[in-house]
Image (spheres, grey):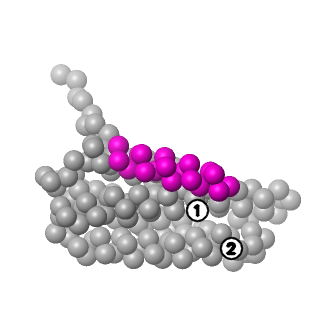
Amino acid sequence: MPTTRPPADACSLLDADHRNVKKLFKEFEPLAESKAKTAPAKRRELADQICMELTVHARIEEEIFYPALREAIKEEDLLDEAEVEHASAKELIAQIEAGDENDPKWCAKVIVLGEYIDHHVKEERNEIFVKARAAKKLDLVAMRDELQARKDELMAETAALA
Protein backbone atom coordinates (compact mmCIF):
# COMPACT_ATOMS: atom_id res chain seq x y z
CA MET A 1 0.00 0.00 0.00
CA PRO A 2 1.61 3.32 -1.03
CA THR A 3 2.15 5.86 1.69
CA THR A 4 0.61 9.24 1.05
CA ARG A 5 2.22 12.38 2.30
CA PRO A 6 0.03 14.74 4.24
CA PRO A 7 -0.99 17.82 2.28
CA ALA A 8 1.30 20.83 2.51
CA ASP A 9 0.26 22.90 5.49
CA ALA A 10 1.22 26.18 7.15
CA CYS A 11 4.12 24.50 8.97
CA SER A 12 5.46 23.10 5.68
CA LEU A 13 5.43 26.56 4.11
CA LEU A 14 7.17 28.14 7.08
CA ASP A 15 9.73 25.34 7.17
CA ALA A 16 10.47 25.81 3.45
CA ASP A 17 11.27 29.45 4.30
CA HIS A 18 13.58 28.22 7.07
CA ARG A 19 15.48 25.94 4.68
CA ASN A 20 15.79 28.69 2.08
CA VAL A 21 17.24 31.23 4.50
CA LYS A 22 19.58 28.60 5.98
CA LYS A 23 20.98 28.10 2.48
CA LEU A 24 21.56 31.85 2.16
CA PHE A 25 23.42 31.94 5.49
CA LYS A 26 25.61 29.04 4.28
CA GLU A 27 26.45 31.04 1.14
CA PHE A 28 27.31 34.06 3.29
CA GLU A 29 29.75 32.33 5.65
CA PRO A 30 32.74 32.00 3.27
CA LEU A 31 32.21 35.58 2.08
CA ALA A 32 32.48 36.91 5.64
CA GLU A 33 36.22 36.22 5.61
CA SER A 34 36.88 36.70 1.91
CA LYS A 35 39.35 39.41 0.90
CA ALA A 36 38.25 39.34 -2.76
CA LYS A 37 37.34 42.71 -4.21
CA THR A 38 33.87 41.43 -5.10
CA ALA A 39 33.22 40.05 -1.60
CA PRO A 40 31.73 43.21 -0.02
CA ALA A 41 29.17 43.61 -2.80
CA LYS A 42 28.24 39.93 -2.69
CA ARG A 43 28.06 40.07 1.14
CA ARG A 44 25.67 43.02 0.92
CA GLU A 45 23.54 41.32 -1.72
CA LEU A 46 23.20 38.12 0.31
CA ALA A 47 22.62 39.96 3.60
CA ASP A 48 19.91 42.09 1.98
CA GLN A 49 18.24 38.93 0.66
CA ILE A 50 18.47 37.26 4.09
CA CYS A 51 17.02 40.33 5.82
CA MET A 52 14.17 40.65 3.35
CA GLU A 53 13.28 36.93 3.56
CA LEU A 54 13.36 36.98 7.37
CA THR A 55 11.35 40.20 7.61
CA VAL A 56 8.58 38.84 5.39
CA HIS A 57 8.65 35.48 7.19
CA ALA A 58 8.37 37.13 10.61
CA ARG A 59 5.47 39.28 9.44
CA ILE A 60 3.41 36.36 8.17
CA GLU A 61 4.06 34.45 11.37
CA GLU A 62 3.15 37.44 13.55
CA GLU A 63 0.10 38.48 11.52
CA ILE A 64 -1.42 35.05 10.83
CA PHE A 65 0.31 32.00 12.34
CA TYR A 66 0.99 33.08 15.94
CA PRO A 67 -2.44 34.71 16.55
CA ALA A 68 -4.21 31.57 15.32
CA LEU A 69 -1.97 29.42 17.52
CA ARG A 70 -2.66 31.58 20.57
CA GLU A 71 -6.35 30.79 20.16
CA ALA A 72 -5.78 27.07 19.60
CA ILE A 73 -3.10 26.03 22.10
CA LYS A 74 -2.44 26.72 25.76
CA GLU A 75 1.34 27.19 25.64
CA GLU A 76 1.48 30.98 25.76
CA ASP A 77 5.11 30.88 26.95
CA LEU A 78 6.26 29.18 23.72
CA LEU A 79 4.67 31.88 21.61
CA ASP A 80 5.92 34.66 23.90
CA GLU A 81 9.47 33.32 23.49
CA ALA A 82 9.07 33.10 19.72
CA GLU A 83 7.93 36.71 19.58
CA VAL A 84 10.85 37.86 21.77
CA GLU A 85 13.20 35.96 19.43
CA HIS A 86 11.59 37.78 16.49
CA ALA A 87 12.21 41.13 18.23
CA SER A 88 15.90 40.29 18.73
CA ALA A 89 16.24 39.21 15.11
CA LYS A 90 14.54 42.41 13.91
CA GLU A 91 17.01 44.47 15.94
CA LEU A 92 19.95 42.72 14.29
CA ILE A 93 18.31 43.01 10.86
CA ALA A 94 17.99 46.79 11.34
CA GLN A 95 21.69 47.01 12.30
CA ILE A 96 22.69 44.91 9.27
CA GLU A 97 20.57 46.96 6.88
CA ALA A 98 22.02 50.23 8.20
CA GLY A 99 25.59 48.90 8.51
CA ASP A 100 28.68 48.85 6.31
CA GLU A 101 29.48 45.53 4.65
CA ASN A 102 33.21 46.33 4.89
CA ASP A 103 33.06 46.41 8.70
CA PRO A 104 34.15 43.07 10.24
CA LYS A 105 31.54 43.51 13.00
CA TRP A 106 28.88 43.80 10.29
CA CYS A 107 29.77 40.30 9.09
CA ALA A 108 29.67 39.07 12.69
CA LYS A 109 26.14 40.45 13.01
CA VAL A 110 25.01 38.46 9.97
CA ILE A 111 26.63 35.30 11.37
CA VAL A 112 25.01 35.83 14.80
CA LEU A 113 21.65 36.44 13.12
CA GLY A 114 22.07 33.04 11.46
CA GLU A 115 22.73 31.46 14.86
CA TYR A 116 19.63 33.14 16.33
CA ILE A 117 17.57 31.88 13.44
CA ASP A 118 18.94 28.32 13.81
CA HIS A 119 17.85 28.32 17.45
CA HIS A 120 14.42 29.76 16.60
CA VAL A 121 13.86 27.23 13.80
CA LYS A 122 14.69 24.30 16.10
CA GLU A 123 12.12 25.48 18.63
CA GLU A 124 9.50 26.01 15.95
CA ARG A 125 10.10 22.59 14.38
CA ASN A 126 10.36 20.63 17.61
CA GLU A 127 7.74 22.38 19.71
CA ILE A 128 5.51 24.93 17.99
CA PHE A 129 4.85 23.00 14.76
CA VAL A 130 4.21 19.79 16.71
CA LYS A 131 1.62 21.55 18.87
CA ALA A 132 0.09 23.34 15.87
CA ARG A 133 -0.36 20.07 13.99
CA ALA A 134 -1.90 18.44 17.07
CA ALA A 135 -4.39 21.30 17.61
CA LYS A 136 -7.84 20.26 16.45
CA LYS A 137 -9.06 23.84 16.03
CA LEU A 138 -6.52 24.79 13.37
CA ASP A 139 -6.95 24.28 9.63
CA LEU A 140 -3.26 24.42 8.74
CA VAL A 141 -3.91 23.56 5.07
CA ALA A 142 -6.19 26.59 4.63
CA MET A 143 -3.76 28.70 6.68
CA ARG A 144 -0.97 27.74 4.29
CA ASP A 145 -2.87 29.42 1.46
CA GLU A 146 -3.44 32.52 3.60
CA LEU A 147 0.25 32.65 4.57
CA GLN A 148 1.34 32.22 0.93
CA ALA A 149 -1.00 34.98 -0.28
CA ARG A 150 0.28 37.40 2.38
CA LYS A 151 3.88 36.41 1.69
CA ASP A 152 3.39 37.07 -2.05
CA GLU A 153 1.85 40.46 -1.24
CA LEU A 154 4.74 41.45 1.06
CA MET A 155 7.36 40.25 -1.44
CA ALA A 156 5.72 42.33 -4.17
CA GLU A 157 5.69 45.40 -1.87
CA THR A 158 9.37 44.84 -1.06
CA ALA A 159 10.28 44.45 -4.74
CA ALA A 160 8.42 47.67 -5.57
CA LEU A 161 10.53 49.52 -2.98
CA ALA A 162 13.82 48.17 -4.31
Q: Residues within 10 Å of mark 2 (few under 14, many from 20)?
A: few
Q: Using the image, tell me which numbered label, if any, was put on residue 31.
A: none
Q: Quadrant of the C terminus?
A: bottom right
SS under mark 1: helix
Q: Compared with residue 10, is residue 30 higher up or lower down, i.e. above or below?
A: below
Q: Residue at x 57, y 59 (%)?
A: 52
Question: Outermost residue toward the right?
Answer: 37
Q: Compared with residue 119, is residue 26 higher up or lower down, i.e. above or below?
A: above
SS under mark 2: helix
Q: Residues within 10 Å of mark 1 (few under 14, many from 20)?
A: many
User: What residue range appears in magenta?
Assistant: 145-162
The kind of secondary structure the magenta stretch mainly shows is helix
Q: Amino acid at mark 1?
A: Cys
Disc 1 target residue: 51
Q: Residue at x 18, y 22 (%)?
A: 1
Q: Compared with residue 144, is residue 100 higher up or lower down, i.e. above or below?
A: below
Nearer-N-terminus badge (1/2): 1
Q: Compared with residue 82, is residue 11 higher up or lower down, i.e. above or below?
A: above
Q: Is residue 135 left or right of residue 64?
A: left
Q: Amino acid at mark 2?
A: Ala
Indicate yes or no whether the magenta region holds residue 160: yes
Q: What percent of the width, then of the height, locates residue 15?
A: 40, 51
Disc 2 target residue: 98
